[in-house]
Amino acid sequence: MSSHITVRLQLSYSGFSLDLDVQLPGKGVTALFGHSGSGKTTCLRCIAGLERAEHAFVQINDEVWQDSHNKLFVPVHKRSLGYIFQEASLFPHLSVRANLEFGLSRIPRQARRVELAHAADLLGITHLLERAPNHLSGGERQRVGIARALLTSPKLLLMDEPLAALDSQRKAEILPYLERLHAELDIPVLYVSHSQDEVARLADHIVLLSEGKALASGPIGDILARLDLPLSQGDDAGVVIEGTVCEYDAQYQLLTLQLPNSTQCLRVAHAPLAVGQALRVKVQARDISLSLHRSEHSSILNSLQATFISETATDNQAHVLVRLDIAGSALLARITRYSRDQLDLQPGQSIWLQIKSVAVLA
Amino acid sequence: MPLSSADFAAIWLTLKLASLTTVILLLVGTPIALWLAHTRSRLRGPIGAIVALPLVLPPTVIGFYLLLAMGPHGYVGQLTQAMGLGTLTFSFAGLVIGSVIYSMPFVVQPLQNAFTAIGPRPLEVAATLRANPWDCFFTVVLPLARPGFITAAILGFAHTVGEFGVVLMIGGNIPEKTRVVSVQIYDHVEALEYAQAHWLAGAMVVFSFLVLLALYSSRKSQSTWS
């Protein structure tokens, strides 16, 4: 059985056209990332069948949902998908429990893989089951919406900016649930977002959309570190690295993370975690400084040896963006053009980098 | 006894006509209102205007054209004659058809407003939760549009009760067949039976007031989609 998602879409209305041909992994979280108007939501709606692209081929693992060559269009209600809208869109005339049962009761018993109690527990809504939707907070409503979609035991979960309508506190309340979902359920997720932070936290794979076209598609570590994409141009450019916990210093409350395929480690302030557990961190390009020698006696905790690969101009004349490599993991550093000339960096050269801060994404 | 048996026959006929018309209108009006609320077709404007025509036309105009159409030389009349049904003019069935057309906007418009207010989102949500279109109509649209259905039924019923011009044009004044309350009042006045006319007319005022009272007091908190 092939485990991938194929999406080919061609669609145009006045002033907008979508032309997409991507192959995505059939598991994990794939982010459709781009500015508003880039066609992210339209793309998701076409995959769901809520909108009908004139020319389209949509295949989810071994199921074909649309093939316009063979005039095949599976109606939305026959597609095994879960769709999370930007606003939770709960049915106001039904209680939370009845909302959850709406999808569940339409799935044949033998096809159910998620139980109501489990989904409610996973999203922390067990105490809300008998309430009416208009007595819930925005964050609670969205969690009910997610649980409702999960209960249809979908083969694909489509999430259209599920956090966009919420304030930052509510976002922080939901993100851990989305991470649990990612960790505990084996359902591929397509996640539409324009927030780099959300994508960095949740996504394994990323499709970069601009004006209805895919600029790039690939694993998140690769895409965020590519100098040729607009992602690296912004002020919050940076990379995501998944390290493995190898030690915890209880006295100073520092966690040591081993970088993939490397003996070098990052130390971050964090609560204790079990050795061997994976942890995602984001390292911003503006938080890295470079030097030719290892700097001792510094307050900077993380000093790593890396190889200089290449550089590119940024949106700012005074700065350049430098790509570095540590055993296959890419890092970006934003330094001044002056510093670049002083250091006289050559491709392949070994160099020391200091990381001022590391953000843990979990 | 202030009301004669002829008066009671007229009241009974009116209630029968209004009830039957309301039921037919809810069945016919719902798909029309659904279509008007959701379509992107260019026909939306013209169809909406045709449905609304009875709001502005004098009932005699509607009655006149219905009389021509259903009469022995009209298209409808020839069709019903070919089917062996005779003509529908001056019959109860003809009155029902006339009333359905006459009261159509009073049923379609509240329904259309209710469906428009619900919007496409709940239907999309229901579809992603595996509800087929019929299932979606009965479990989502119907409950959410309930206030609209109540308004439509009450207005359709009340407006049919108040019908006069169309009835006179296509139904005439046949006791127990086409003589409704409004026509009966007219007859009493023509015969200078003012006391009789008062009883019936007063009953109509009270009835209409109670209907509207029920309608306006039931509109307290209409559920909104969130």
Image (cartoon, coloured by chain):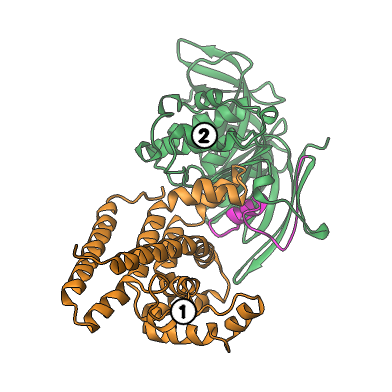
Chain colours: A green, B orange
Type of the residue with mark 2: Leu
Mark 2 nearby-residue class (10 Å; few <14, some 14–19, many ≥20): many
Image quarter where the N terminus of chain A lies is top right
- B79 and A91: which one is in front? B79
Q: Residue at x 51, y 43 (%)?
A: A162
Q: Chain of mark 2?
A: A
- Determine the CA span between mark 1 and mark 2: 56 Å
The boundaries of the magenta stretch are A36-61
Q: Residue lying furthest top in this view?
A: A251
- Mark count: 2
The answer to if A47 sits in the magenta stretch is yes
- A261 and A292: which one is in front? A261
Instruction: Please indicate whether residue A263 sits to the left or right of residue A336 in the image.
Output: right
Q: Position of residue A59 (x, y in %)?
A: 76, 46
Residue of label 1 = B90
Residue A238 visible (yes or no): yes
Q: Position of residue A203 (x, y in %)?
A: 61, 38
Instruction: Please indicate whether residue B100 sits to the left or right of residue B74 in the image.
Output: left
- B145 and A281: which one is in front? B145
Q: Residue lying furthest left in this view?
A: B195
